[in-house]
Image: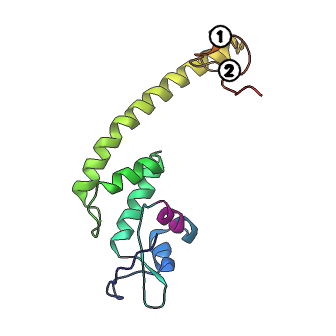
């Protein structure tokens, strides 16, 4: 959401300039703003303007998304940073160390899944009872067949 914070116009970016400089579509920038990932202010002509440090925040968002980090987690990370300045190398180090644990866990999980997938294709059974891929973590199977989480009509 846009806030009323006047900045020198020579340092502020229009949404089009921010899109061109960051390589991110205007619609995506508006979406990021609606989710509280970036902030703008309105100038005297009621046009959005973005402080230059938003460029670095957008870069951080894009890198995090490429790593598979959820927008909610990116938002939480950005909230931990001071407002009014671009994220620093030290900020990135802190965030990346935090995300590294989750990435390592996902890599391990995907590796296990890949290894099970090879075996499953080999057997060809796709058993609903025994297959760890088709019926992963079946917690409700012991309670009977059919959908168990749907509310009764």
Which residue: 40% across, 62% down? 59
Query: Going by the image, does 41 lie left or right of 126?
Result: left
**Where does the image place residue 21, in percent across and percent down from the top left?**
44, 74
- Residue found farthest to the bottom: 45
Secondary structure of residue under mark 1: helix
Which picture quadrant has residue 27? bottom right
Residue 130 shows in this picture: no
Query: Going by the image, does 84 lie left or right of 68?
Result: left
Q: CA distance from mark 2 to mark 1?
A: 8 Å
Secondary structure of residue under mark 2: loop
Label annotation for residue 148: 2
**Where does the image place residue 55, in percent across and percent down from the top left?**
38, 69
Residue 33 lies in the magenta stretch: yes
- Residue found farthest to the right: 153
Which residue: 49% across, 86% down? 46
Query: Going by the image, does 112 lie left or right of 122?
Result: left
Query: How many residues crowd around disc 2 within 10 Å: few (fewer than 14), some, or many (20 or more)?
Result: few
Residue 92 lies in the magenta stretch: no
Q: Main secondary structure of the magenta part?
A: helix
Q: Mark 2 touching mark 1, by CB under 8 A?
A: yes
**Where does the image place residue 104, in percent across and percent down from the top left?**
38, 33
Residue 150 shows in this picture: yes
Query: If you read the primary sequence from the N terminus, does the residue marked by circle 2 or circle 1 appear first?
Result: 1
Q: Which residues are magenta?
A: 29-35
Query: Going by the image, does 52 lie left or right of 32?
Result: left
Which residue: 70% across, 27% down? 150
Question: Mark 1 highlights which residue?
Answer: 143
Label annotation for residue 34: none
Which residue: 64% across, 12% down? 141
């Amino acid at each position: 959401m846009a806030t009323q914070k006047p900045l020198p116009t020579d340092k502020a970016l229009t949404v089009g300039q921010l899109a061109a400089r960051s390589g991110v579509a205007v619609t995506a920038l508006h979406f990021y703003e609606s989710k509280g990932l970036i902030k703008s202010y309105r100038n005297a002509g009621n046009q959005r303007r973005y402080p230059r440090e938003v460029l670095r925040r957008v870069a951080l968002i894009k890198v995090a998304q490429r790593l598979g980090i959820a927008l909610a987690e990116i938002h939480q990370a950005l909230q931990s940073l001071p407002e009014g300045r671009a994220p620093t190398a030290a900020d990135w180090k802190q965030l990346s160390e935090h995300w590294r644990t989750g990435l390592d866990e996902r890599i391990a999980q995907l590796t296990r899944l890949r290894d099970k997938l090879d075996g499953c294709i080999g057997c060809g059974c796709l058993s609903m009872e025994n297959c760890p891929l088709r019926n992963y973590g079946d917690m409700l199977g012991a309670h009977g067949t059919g959908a168990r989480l749907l509310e009764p009509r």
